């Protein structure tokens, strides 16, 4: 699966917000466990970024993330900048950008992991601050389906790898 990333303009965000707050009749949104998910209804002022996802070269849809810049500002800025590619090349010599990278680990009913744009196999990646950066806090909890979280190798090893929860994940809190 390939990802094409970017940052939404305010007009796109506003239009998306309208569309998200009025789901199609009869088309309830559900997570991997079948639990009904309600669309976001208010504008929080937090930055939003997106991935255009493809599977085997065919478009599979757009995933929109709201980043908690008010709670984890360095983490949110790292992810946002990796979506836009605005920071150029990293210490590895590779572009600091998710574009064209894939999900290297998928566990049905749990999560999809990606963000290793240096090696593509889950052993690489790089933050916009250097190889890795420190944990900010653990104030946010994993809320299940759709939760975006950093994947790392332990304390203070955040780079570019992330995962998206596809089911309930209370064991991560």
Image (spheres, rainbow, N blue to C red):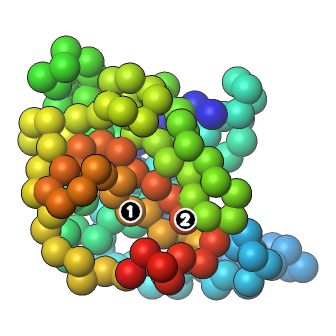
State the quadrant of the C terminus. Answer: bottom left
Look at 30% across and 34% down and name the residue there: 125
State the quadrant of the N terminus. Answer: top right
Count how many numbered circles sit on residues in the image.
2
Q: Earlier in the sequence, mark 2 or mark 1?
A: 1
Q: Position of residue 82 (x, y in %)?
A: 29, 40
Q: Position of residue 38 (x, y in %)?
A: 64, 84
Q: Indicate which disc residue 53 carries.
A: none
Please determine whether, in this image, residue 114 is positioned above or below residue 149.
above
Look at 38% across and 62% down and name the residue there: 149
Q: Mark yes or no: residue 35 visible.
A: yes
In front here: 151 or 4?
151
Q: Circle 2 is placed at which residue position? A: 165
Q: Circle 1 is placed at which residue position? A: 149
Q: Tell me: 49 left or right of 58.
A: left
Mark 1 element type: strand
In front here: 22 or 92?
92
Quadrant position of residue 117: top left
């Amino acid at each position: 699966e390939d990802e094409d990333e970017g940052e939404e303009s305010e007009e796109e965000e506003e239009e998306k917000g309208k569309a998200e707050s009025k789901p199609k009749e009869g088309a309830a949104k559900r997570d991997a466990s079948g639990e009904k998910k309600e669309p976001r209804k208010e504008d929080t002022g937090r930055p939003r970024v997106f991935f255009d996802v493809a599977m085997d070269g065919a478009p599979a849809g757009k995933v929109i993330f709201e980043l908690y810049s008010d709670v984890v500002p360095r983490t949110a800025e790292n992810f946002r900048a990796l979506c836009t590619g605005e920071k150029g090349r990293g210490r590895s010599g590779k572009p600091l950008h998710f574009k064209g990278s894939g999900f290297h680990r998928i566990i049905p009913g749990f999560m999809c992991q990606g963000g290793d744009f240096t090696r593509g196999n889950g052993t690489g990646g790089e933050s916009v601050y250097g190889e890795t950066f420190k944990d900010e806090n653990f104030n946010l909890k994993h809320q299940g389906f759709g939760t975006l979280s950093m994947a790392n190798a332990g304390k203070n090893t955040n780079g570019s790898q992330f995962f998206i929860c596809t089911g309930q994940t209370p064991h991560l809190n």
